[in-house]
Amino acid sequence: MFIVMRAGHNESEIADIIKRLQQLGFSGHISHGVERTVIGVVGQTYPELKETLEAWPGVEDVVPISKPYKLASREFQPHSTTIKVGHVTIGGDTIVMMAGPCAVESEEQLMATARAVKSAGAHILRGGAFKPSTSPYTFRGLGEDGLKLLAQASKETGMPVVTEVMTVNDVELVSRYADILQIGARNMQNFNLLDEVGKIKKPVMLKRGMSATIQEWLLSAEYVLSQGNKRVILCARGIRTFETHTRNTMDIDAIPIIKRLSHLPVIADPSHGTGKWYLVTPLAVAAVAAGADGLLVEVHPNPEAALKDGPQSLNFHNFAQLMAQISPVAAAVGRRVA
Amino acid sequence: MFIVMRAGHNESEIADIIKRLQQLGFSGHISHGVERTVIGVVGQTYPELKETLEAWPGVEDVVPISKPYKLASREFQPHSTTIKVGHVTIGGDTIVMMAGPCAVESEEQLMATARAVKSAGAHILRGGAFKPSTSPYTFRGLGEDGLKLLAQASKETGMPVVTEVMTVNDVELVSRYADILQIGARNMQNFNLLDEVGKIKKPVMLKRGMSATIQEWLLSAEYVLSQGNKRVILCARGIRTFETHTRNTMDIDAIPIIKRLSHLPVIADPSHGTGKWYLVTPLAVAAVAAGADGLLVEVHPNPEAALKDGPQSLNFHNFAQLMAQISPVAAAVGRRVA
Amino acid sequence: MFIVMRAGHNESEIADIIKRLQQLGFSGHISHGVERTVIGVVGQTYPELKETLEAWPGVEDVVPISKPYKLASREFQPHSTTIKVGHVTIGGDTIVMMAGPCAVESEEQLMATARAVKSAGAHILRGGAFKPSTSPYTFRGLGEDGLKLLAQASKETGMPVVTEVMTVNDVELVSRYADILQIGARNMQNFNLLDEVGKIKKPVMLKRGMSATIQEWLLSAEYVLSQGNKRVILCARGIRTFETHTRNTMDIDAIPIIKRLSHLPVIADPSHGTGKWYLVTPLAVAAVAAGADGLLVEVHPNPEAALKDGPQSLNFHNFAQLMAQISPVAAAVGRRVA
Amino acid sequence: MFIVMRAGHNESEIADIIKRLQQLGFSGHISHGVERTVIGVVGQTYPELKETLEAWPGVEDVVPISKPYKLASREFQPHSTTIKVGHVTIGGDTIVMMAGPCAVESEEQLMATARAVKSAGAHILRGGAFKPSTSPYTFRGLGEDGLKLLAQASKETGMPVVTEVMTVNDVELVSRYADILQIGARNMQNFNLLDEVGKIKKPVMLKRGMSATIQEWLLSAEYVLSQGNKRVILCARGIRTFETHTRNTMDIDAIPIIKRLSHLPVIADPSHGTGKWYLVTPLAVAAVAAGADGLLVEVHPNPEAALKDGPQSLNFHNFAQLMAQISPVAAAVGRRVA
């Protein structure tokens, strides 16, 4: 961490800063430049130190140098993490396909979808039992009944299940039924929930918050990792920008950035990333080309009648076409779809 | 709600849409324009209907016309809501000043601050016992000990207390000590938490999410209102933009917009809105000039030693100066500071 | 275009609006909904009409239905435009590779780069003679000397040249040397310049403005098209968001969106889209997978010594590797690299 | 400027960097921290050096320390610049009111508006003769005829005139008629135009680009200043964000930030800043409270019939009311309206 002094600071301010640093257990390394004096902070710094230093007299800016996350960083662990869920390995050579309805609506809807995506080549079943909803007046999911249906579909098809948990109180319940617990974009900084899923024995898929920086996203992963749960999967799903043609702007560039900064696997969700079904396939293949370890895709037997996210859901036919397009692109970048 | 048909749709698609609308209990009103055919949806529509209709064949776009929130809207309640907390009225002629430390750190720190802001003219004491933190490695608050100190400071100074609650499980605990429960920006769409504070008997101050639209903010207020808690206070605190000079861009324009769309009181938080103490006073007076019902300001006995948010905290002297500047501006726009 | 009336409007306001519409040559189609009254505007509307109508008494909102651009839209021209430049066809089955230095610095630098990218398989040479620069104190290009070098490199290698024109006064000059004139992101709404390049006989490559919506981008294309120049190429190059890890967020989703809305070819510029050389190749293959008609890539003999954009430039080796990765991905999506 | 070395760099990379720095005329100051090695660059750095250094082997990041603009900075000139235009002083104790129609439409419209705003207390007449327009099909101004009408209105009312110039070729023409030349938001980085208005003898009002950072805005001012024209006025006019309720988000916080970073006067344009007439007055008073040196307000005799910007224009009555509200707020912050 470096302290940049204000132009026109006086020497007593520097002396004062050196003394304060020593009181905190650091030493200060003064460096007089042509335009600015800079003090290097020597010692094991921590993120909140920046705010402390910024409030000191004579300080113009404080520049952190090391990254504020550690367990999530590739510097800490150079080799890529792979996560086994049933027979599926996430983060290895194989592109992992997670597919299913946005919300579990009924036994018929879920079972039909599970069979269809399985037969098209999906590896993991997705489906929401607890649904976040911007408005209090819309469908919020079937709750435990939805979880039971997911477990039933998993049993029949052999696919592990990923589903969202929205609140600390439901972590134990959802863990009973699901193989991977998803933390949704709106809860990416629900720190109590992150702490809680950090204590369980199941993998956690952490979606990027709509306006979270990549650093904030990795810091949220760090919450889970630092509680002892090392099986964290990141999921890119679009960010909020000024563009109004789509609900979100799909953050394809986050995929190679994460691969560089972190050892954790990263999945792409082109359904939420775009909000429009006809953009799902082009962005899905783009994500795989850019290095994604898998995809999360919303599929519905009849998107026109879906209770949630109809406009961004693929029907069975379109999902099969997506699968057909993924394979050659995966091969072109040295991966494969099992 | 209006359905805009795709150019080149065929007549059977229109007939199909009319039939589907009737099955859902609506009627359709066809209108052929020069470039597009539009179908008006007649009946009591609801927000999620948009998604359903967008997935129908031949549909290009669906345009909602009525607002998706109701209880929060000024159309529903034309007169402004006022909220009494102890002797303080929020939303009336008087600008309400809420001040105190970002985080409760110790009895000395809190009591000194409480006395100082009280003597400078503050009406409500703010202070965090549970602190959201981007990193798992930074200070996260004193918890219940912090709540006890807040209650003690409230008792001594006579100021009601506003403090944040971060999780459903703490609502009952925080309610025991606080007069107003704050929902932080990162929890604005923690829907389980919104449901829970909708059931209590205390006022709720709902901060705008960093990248929440004004409509989403009012929908989150609607969650609380629809559970029966009518005492909701909105708090503007800056939004995330491309600008990097400040942590956030202070959303002053949200203040008159909220006043027009909603009957709920709106408070401005220039401390989080800017992240820099020297911007707090100019933005505070701007907020009052723009119609804010009050201010939430971070004050610390010694910002240079604060555990959280030092760079954006005012010391006692600067807070007294802010108070001195607020009064004439409030008077200039027909308000007063008690 | 639809007029949404304010709740609580009165009948005389509606009568007044109908009369005003008739004076402007339109007719009004009234439709009373449960919550709102809406008036359909019948006739050949135009974009600025929205603003006019919004200012009328009783009006809450005006919703345009048709798109404000016409010549650029796929509705106007269903088949995709292809543009021939020398032996190269842009917008056809073949992925077109445009490569070269950010700025022309010297004969050696340019000739070496031109030969290297040609031998790696590039089709078009890029290079800047006039360089936009955020600061007045940095390198702004060699001007006409740079153009002459580009023409020389073109002659030797047989590759057509694309280069930026920044001001109306240089259009004639740049046209003399270049095969394609590029309009940079900062000039996307330099309307005088758009008019001017609309009158020339050479193709124009129009970059997306850093914060331009897709609709604004297509409206800028419409400027060029409406002056008679039908040979417009669009170029996606990243948009400005809150993320600070990269200079821009690469707008991969704009590629399939443009393909759907417009018949114009679209090129991707992953160099400016990301600002970091190690992200160029993953985003380049992602762009091709998503449907881009070509790529624009910055290449420099020695990026460490580049006068501009060194951090985002590939060296010859890395560019050859990029070319090797593009081919199989292009094939996987049914395209090829000549 | 500081070079942050990558974790795991080797000593030869450091030696190499020191040598390269020396070749460029700098010296390097090595500092080994616990987690990172940092090299301070000693000498007179310049902005583009950052890009050069970032491309060197072993470098992870380059952190500039001094600001890239100089003439615009308050460090360079501690006292605030005041600019005299006729009898009006911009940047002094008095709030300067600039008002008039978005576009000059006719003699009647302009003269009526000029008289009305003059009589309500305005100091400077605004009006557009050359209008930037997102669509090629909308009204683009009366051109020189508009300039002549502005000059006539100026003569009659005694108010100096501010009007926009859009292209290098019109600078001489517009200078003949106008007292202040305005550079619009879309041209903030039209560097040729900035160079050109840097050479004239009239003040320049530089609007902030829709997605320009404050630093980029000051760098554009630096273009004008570095050509010799010291009379630059900045104008805040709203920035592009994710919020869709308004056309822009009014950047009130930019006002005190500019006052701190620069000596140049800053004007606020709440008409473009919000796009809605009913938000103009609250944001105007907020801007004055936050420290703006003046306001730029769109006024039209009959906004409902305006050719441009009707929804954000005040009529004469509303402008008089705005003037009445500005005075006490100006007084409250120690300013006055002449």
Image: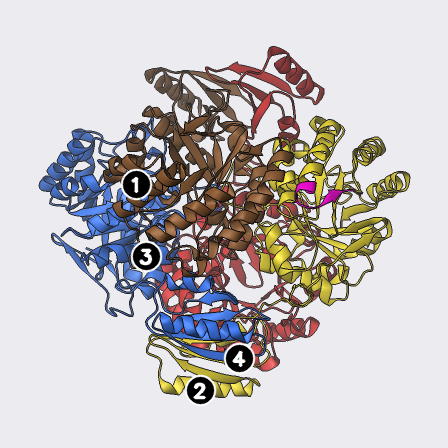
Chain colours: A yellow, B red, C brown, D blue
Relative depth, front residue between A34 and C140? C140
Give the residue furthest to the front.
Answer: C156
Amino acid at pointer 4? His
Q: What residue did someone put label 3 on?
A: C135
Camera-nearest label, 1 or 3: 3
Which disc, if any, is residue B307?
none
According to the image, label 1 marks what residue? D318
Find the distance from the CA under tag 4 to the CA under tag 2.
Answer: 23 Å
The crowd level at tag 1 (other Cα within 10 Å; few <14, some 14-19, many 20+) is: some
Q: Which residue is mark 2?
A: A16
Chain of the residue where label 4 is placed in the rendered structure:
D
Instruction: Provide the residue span drawn in magenta.
Output: A330-338
Q: Secondary structure at mark 2?
A: helix
The mark found on residue D32 in the picture is 4
- Element under label 1? helix
- For this rendering, which residue is in front, D264 or B89? D264
- Left or right: residue C263 compared with residue A158: left
Amino acid type, mark 2: Asp
- Label 1 to label 4, Cα distance in Å? 63 Å
Q: Chain of mark 1?
A: D
- Residue B32 at x, y = what percent? 51, 14
* Amino acid type of the residue tagged 1 in the rendering: Asn
Give me the C-alpha separation between circle 1 and circle 3: 41 Å
